[in-house]
Amino acid sequence: MLVFKFGGASVKDAAGVINLGKVVNSYAGNKILVVVSAMGKTTNALERLTTAYVNQQDDLNQIFDEIKEYHYSILSSLFAPGHSVYDEVANTFVEIDWAIEDEPHDDFDFIYDQIVSIGELVSTRIVNAWFNQEGIASKCLDVRSYIHTDNTYREGVVDWDKTRESIQKDVPALLEKSIVVTQGFLGGTSENFTTTLGREGSDYTASIFANCLGAESVTTWKDVPGILNADPKYFTDTIKFDELSYQEAIEMTYYGASVIHPKTIKPLQNAKIPLLVKPFSDPSAPGTIIREGAVNAFTKPVIIVKQKQVLLSISTNDYSFISEVHLSEIFGVFAENQVKVNLMQTSALSFTACIDYSLDRFTKLLATLKQSFKVKYNDELTLITLRHYTDSSLLEITSGKTVLMKQTNRNTAQVVIK
Ligand code: ASP
Ligand code: MG
C-alpha cells in the first residue's frame, strides 16, 4: 500500500483539489491512504482566529468569515448547489461557533488545538466528496480515533502502541475497498479532545500510518521538484537531490529544513520505508527519494535558513559564573515553556541561546527567566546552517552581514546574522 500526503499548497484552490484527484487516479489499482493538510494558509488564519478569540478582539468574526468564504468559494467551484458537502462543511465550522461562543477560560494551547484542527477536518471532507463525485471510491477517516496522543496540546506525544493497534484493526480492511482519506496534523486524547502534532505535522501523520501499516512508500506531493539544497524563496541556482540517506534527511530537518517535518523520518527509517518528495504539478517526475543505502552527492552545500530568531543572553544577578546549577535551571525553564534551543554558547558570565520567536511562548519564557536571572535579547535575527560547507561558501553567506554568533564543526557551520 502507498501513503500520499498533500500539503496546504497542493489544495489551496479548486484546481488543486482537481489535480489531487488526477494524481490519485493515475495510481488506480493501488491501495492508497491519503493524508491531507488544511487548505492553503488556513492554519495561519485559524491561528489568528484563536488569538483574536483569546484576546476578545473586534476582528474575531471578520477573520472567521474570511476563512469560511475562502472554503465556500472552493466548494462552489467543485460542487453543484445542494450537494451534501456544503452541510458537512457548515457543520464542521459550527464547532468553531461553539468554541468561541463563551469567554475564553481554558488554557491557550488547548483552545488552539480545538480551533486550528478545523482546517484539516474541513479539507478532508472536501477532498473525500470530490473523490466520490469523480467516481473514486473513498472513505474519510477521523484521524482522532486512530492517532492517540497525550494531552500536550500543540505538540501531542503519540502513544505508538495504542495508535498501532487502532490503525491495524480497521485500516487494512478499509483499504481493501476504497481509498482512505484522513487528516494530517491531528491526534486525539483518551478524553476525546483534539490535539495537534506541531506545525507542519502532516508529514509526521503520513509517516505514522506508513509505519503502522508497513507501507511500500510514502510520497509527499509538493510545489517544488523535490528536496533542493536551499529554499528557492531565498536562493537562485538551487540544485535538486535525486536521493538522500535517512541520516542526512534527519540532520537537514533537525536544522530547520522545512521541506519535511522533523519527526517524519525516524519511523520510516525504522521500518525501511522510502520517502519520496515529488512535485504535484508533474507526478511522473522522479523527485527526491530518501531511502536505505542512498548515496549522498553534495556538489553544493545544503543551506537552511531560519527567520524570526531571538538571541537570548542570560547572566546571574550577582555577576557570578554561570554554573551547571544555573544551566540546569535555565533548561528547566526552556523545557517548561516548550522552547527549543537552536544554537547555544556558554562563557564565564553568560549563557547565550538562539531560539525561535513565538509571541506567547517568548513572553512567558522571559518573565520566568527574569525571576532568577538578568536577561538581554536581540530579535529579528536569522539563523543560517550550512551542511557540507566550504570556507568560501561560509564567507559568501555572511558577506555584508553582522555575525552575532558562529559555530562550526567538520560538517556543519551555523551563523546567527542580522
Ligand atoms: N496545516 C498544518 C500546518 O500548516 C499542518 C501541515 O500543513 O502539515 O501547520
Ligand atoms: Mg500546511
Image (cartoon, rainbow, N blue to C red):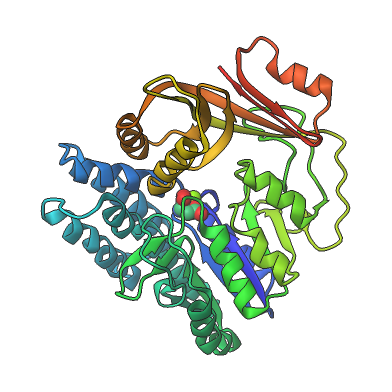
**Residue 252 falls left or right of residue 203:** right
Residue drawn at (20%, 55%), measured in percent from left and top? 106
Q: Position of residue 192 (x, y in %)?
A: 31, 74
Q: Quadrant of residue 193?
A: bottom left
**Residue 162 falls left or right of residue 2:** left
Q: Is residue 215 above or below residue 342?
A: below
- Count every numbered label the image shows and give the total: 0
Considering depth in this image, is 400 or 120 the residue closer to the camera? 400
Q: Quadrant of the C terminus?
A: top right
Note whether residue 66 is visible. yes
Q: Position of residue 57 (x, y in %)?
A: 17, 37
Residue drawn at (52%, 27%), measured in percent from left and top? 352
Note whether residue 11 is visible. no
**Residue 289 falls left or right of residue 320:** right
Q: Position of residue 235 (x, y in %)?
A: 69, 27
Residue drawn at (40%, 36%), measured in percent from left and top? 358
Q: Is residue 176 above or below residue 58?
A: below
Q: Is residue 94 above or below residue 278?
A: below
**Residue 190 falls left or right of residue 287:** left
Considering depth in this image, is 371 or 22 the residue closer to the camera? 371
Considering depth in this image, is 1 or 245 the residue closer to the camera? 245
Q: Quadrant of residue 269?
A: bottom right
Q: Going by the picture, which residue comes out furthest to the left? A: 102
Q: Quadrant of the N terminus?
A: bottom right
